[in-house]
Image (cartoon, rainbow, N blue to C red):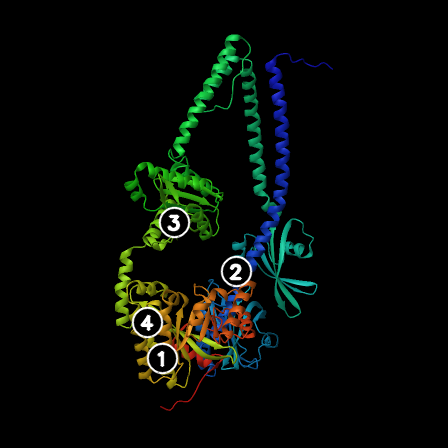
Amino acid sequence: MTFIKVRSLQSKILVLFLFLLFIAQLGGFFYTYQANVKLESIQLNNRLNNAADVFNTQFNNRRYYLSAFAETVAKDYGLKSVLKEDTRTLLVALNNHRKRIDSNLALVLDVKGKVLGHLFTNKQADGTDKIQRGTNDGLVFEHSQTLLGQDKLAQLVTLNGKLYQLNFAPVKEGARTIGWIGFGYLIDAELALDLAKLTGVHIGFVNHDGDSYHVIASSDNTNYPTDGEVYKGIIANTEQKYLYRRVELGNIGDGYVSAILFESRADLLKHIDIQWASLAILLSLSLILSTLGAVAIARSITKPITKLVKQAQSITQGNYDQSVDVSNSKELQQLSEEFNHMTKAIVSREETISFHAFHDPLTHLPNRNSLINTLETLADKQQPFLLIQLCYLRADEITDTLGYQVGDEVTMTVARRLESSQLDINAFHLGAEYFVLIVKPEQAEQLIDKLLAILNVSCHFERIALHLQYAFGIVDSTQYENSSASELLKKSSVAIQRAKSAKKSFEIYNPVFDENTLERLFLTNSLKQAIEEDQLTLHYQPKLCLATMTVSHAEALVRWQHPEKGLIPPDEFVSIAEKTGQMAALTRWVTKAAFDQYLTWQQQGIVINIAINISAENILDESYPDFVINLKKQYQLDDNAITLEVTEDAVVDDPKQATKMLSYLRDNGFKLSVDDYGTGYSSLAQLKQLPVQELKIDRSFVQQLENDENDKIIVKSTIELAHNMSLSVVAEGIEDEYTLNWLKEHNCQLAQGYFISRPLPSAQFTQWLETTHYQVKRVNYNK
């Protein structure tokens, strides 16, 4: 065999380059092939797994929705009142409730399972649903033995040849069950189609009974009919052209119903075939272009002058990484060396220019331009961070008094301390006394404490010792993901100005800072009018005595239903009252309303201690104790009928005044409680001196008791501490049965939270007392 000898340098370079290019392309093609095979497997399985998750979520949401609605309707007083009326009246009420959730089935049974009312929808020719009355009134519901013995009555049942998802709830009169009410949705082709649109796969509902099965409905009856071969193959696991997941929905008699989620392999792999075609075109173009490039490079290597020209072109384009070495002749070698010297000189000048463009000339820290670039890069990478702007205070005073040179020295000292802090921070100098730090998300307070420990060291200039003070403005990028770099910097400036005006060491940015002051002025003026015109109302949240499981206490919580602005959160208008001097009037209104309500309940034979919150301003108000004591005498209330709750912070502000006022109130028959215990800064020594009878543990320690062992330790130790100091304990924030039982086991006296009841207006609260399964403290009064 004769081989063609390759003699020219250009040809040798070209052959070698093409060989290496072919090997690289072949390796890339093989890697891409393997990656696509793996991607195919992952995509096929992930799509069906995601579809099954979406299906389960949607189906369970229907179950929870039916359960919640049935329980709500079962408590409806109007329905109870017509339960024993004539059938037509009952059916009208039942249909009104059914229409609220557009259910396909509604049933009312008596306690023995007999049908009192039965409504179901029937699809008409025009596609509308017609409500029809069932024909089994007076008969025992065929599924009652299966359903009515369960706690959570959610089942699949068949009625009139149709499959329903049905939920029953007991209708009670006091503690006695007087009947059952249930609502259900059809499981049909319409549901299959809706869920198929959500999941993106085909769905069929199948009833399995032993070895036999029946396809109830399909999302695509045209391509996949219920009696077709596709379902037979899928269920028998013989059809290999489809991938599927089976989700069991529930039992019907001896069988069970499941949902089959499936998709054709061919449909799922279409987009991969398209990717292969695109990849083939891309590889072909890459090979052609790379070949042309190889020819050009081979030719350029053989032509030193062309190489020098290309080097000059690279320099004009800002590429200084390459150097030229030509040894063909002395003249060309000298020319290439001059090119290399010129490149190094240009690189040096550009580095100097770039440094001054992105660094502060005084501190040599990165400047505002560098900061903006860094923020934009972090945003593009979606990396969370804290933006902290800091400044040292009295900068103008230092410059005016000691001169610009000392002012610059102070700025450079702060910069050096930030650079040498050994903290994980990126420091930038905005100019003058302002700096910016970018740090990883963590506890900002802890970081600021470390920074202050470094920065607070005295600065000595010309025998003068300066003790600098600092302010920090903090912005959490995760809270403002759509904000630009400039907007984040502006927010940090707003926060630092807020800190300086409030004389605080730091402030975390809050959008409330940017709210229109006219809006707050409007609410300020409206609050005065609301207090005078009784626009306020009290809601009451019960407190449960855990020893006897009796409702014996309640907390009064003020609400404001503004005629124009709607419901205004208490946190918002209470803070306005505190800042505008209206807290005294607000507390007096709440106190008077609570006393009125206590007297109303007392006349009804209901004895419930009412707790009223008082603020730090009320403690400093020497006229408030006489006001509330005179009110107690006027209403002739018993001692300890009213509890006054005061926060830890209110006590810490002026312990002497707090002790004096609280002692006066206790001596005159008021029960006293420390509210939100554990969140303030009161010491045990201060607590020991206060004449209180009760501690109220803050909800932040109670809400996660089931999952947080640290909270259990804190709450348990607080209960034991309170009992050792002869104090009773209230725990607020109970949201589940576990927490209630745990507190009862650890001898907590009173419990309060949404698990027992939400805060309710007085009328609804009174009605709740009549219907709750808890005992209510009562006594007969004949006044």
CA–CA distance between discs 1 and 2? 53 Å
CA–CA distance between discs 2 and 4? 57 Å
Tell me if residue 723 comes above or below residue 304 in the rendering.
below
Question: Which residue is tagged 1?
Answer: 597
Q: Earlier in the sequence, mark 1 or mark 2?
A: 2
Point out the frontmost of discs 1 and 2.
1
**Which circle marks residue 654 in the picture?**
none
Quarter of the image with the C terminus is bottom left
Query: Quick check: 245 left or right of 363?
Result: right
Identify the amino acid type marked 3: Gly
Q: Residue furthest top?
A: 330
CA–CA distance between discs 4 and 3? 34 Å
Question: Which residue is tagged 3?
Answer: 473
Q: Earlier in the sequence, mark 2 or mark 3?
A: 2
Tell me if residue 332 comes above or below residue 264 in the rendering.
above
Question: Which residue is tagged 2?
Answer: 190
Q: Position of residue 648 (x, y in %)?
A: 41, 67
Mark 3 element type: strand
Question: Which residue is tagged 4?
Answer: 587
Point out the frontmost of discs 1 and 3.
3
Identify the amino acid type marked 2: Glu
Are the two marked residues, 2 and 4, in contact with CB atoms closer than 8 angstroms? no
Front-most of residues 650 and 525: 650
Point out the frontmost of discs 2 and 4.
4
